Image (cartoon, helix red, strand yellow):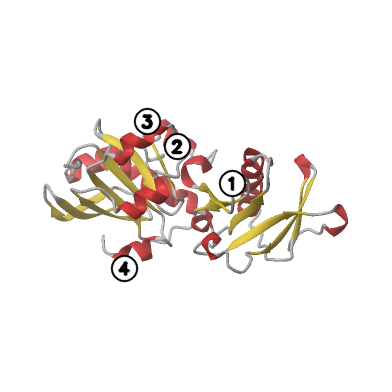
Amino acid sequence: MTDQSQMTNQLLPTIHLIYGTPSFPTPDEEEVMEAIQTVLDSASDQGVQASWTIQQAEKCLGEIQFGLHRIQVAGMANPLPQEIVDCTIHTSPWQPQIKAAMRQHQSHLSFVYRDSAYDPVEKMIALYQTARAFAGEDLLGIVNENAWTAHPPADTLSSERIRSFRQDIPLNLWTGTVKFYVDQDNYWLVTKGHHIFDVPDLAYFVRGNEDAVEIINLFVNIFYYLFEQDVFVTAGDTLEITQQGQFLKFVEVPEGADFLMGPSGTLVIEKSAPDDIAKPG
């Protein structure tokens, strides 16, 4: 894919399937339709249409449409660019042997969501529905460049698991958290991929012995609040996390920390005193 395409894809839901062989699966239209149709929820769903502009052993280019969804498929018989591998597979939270296997991939397929369906969760589900048609024993993982993460396929492309994403958004698969160290003991922890859901990315400066898992859980709680309640926040707004009795303030990314910025902006979280709290508008 070209540099121009990669820049555009940063603002669009995108996943890459990576394979352990130099070849990637390019099923015909009927096979793609059948695989996707098994995941669709009702008889009222529109039929699946699949077409290929290029369908060769070393590269492919096509488009798949069903319902409101239009997804571009592009494949190359070579690994993903090293810079993508470094900021996704390398930073993912899996065991070293799993990440090592994913780094050894030899070919990939990219799926880019091209239409403007109403719900970002449905867009991501559509990508996984489509990816299901291209799964196989050589599939090593699913790379999410927007979220700076990757994961092994496991059961994530099964019909049951894909359907479950509507009830329980798999944030551990669709968003990521990355550490940027300032020194040996202190670092920035920042989310990646929130922009796909029209939610700002979140950052927190972790000092000394602070628990990163606690901060990640805080990120999750804030994400769900902003996404499900459709709340808009900006620097200066404050928030109370009732379950944890925590009071927070949103502030701008400090000067010189542009590496924290996501495609749609990032807000830094600071712990605040109760007297400072007001609900964001």
Mark 3, residue position: 97
> Disc 2 and disc 4: Cα gap in Å?
33 Å
Label 4, secondary structure: give it: helix
Callout 4 crowding tier (Cα within 10 Å): few <14, some 14–19, many ≥20: few
Three-letter code for the amino acid on which mark 4 is drawn: Gln
Q: Residue at x 19, y 38 (%)?
A: 21
Q: Residue at x 25, y 43 (%)?
A: 33
Residue 80 against residue 234 in the figure, above or below: above
> Disc 2 and disc 3: Cα gap in Å?
29 Å
Three-letter code for the amino acid on which mark 1 is drawn: Gln
The reply to whether residue 120 is visible in this rendering is yes
The reply to whether residue 44 is visible in this rendering is no
Q: Residue at x 37, y 65 (%)?
A: 7
User: Residue 178 appears at what percent x and percent y?
Assistant: 52, 49
> Disc 1 and disc 2: Cα gap in Å?
42 Å
Label 2, secondary structure: give it: helix
Mark 4, residue position: 4
Looking at the image, tell me whether mark 1 or mark 2 is earlier in sequence order: 2
Mark 1, residue position: 184
The C terminus sits in image quarter: bottom right
Q: Nearer the viewer, mark 2 or mark 3?
A: 3
Three-letter code for the amino acid on which mark 3 is drawn: Gln
Q: Residue furthest left?
A: 56
Q: Are marks 2 and 4 in contact (CB under 8 Å)?
A: no
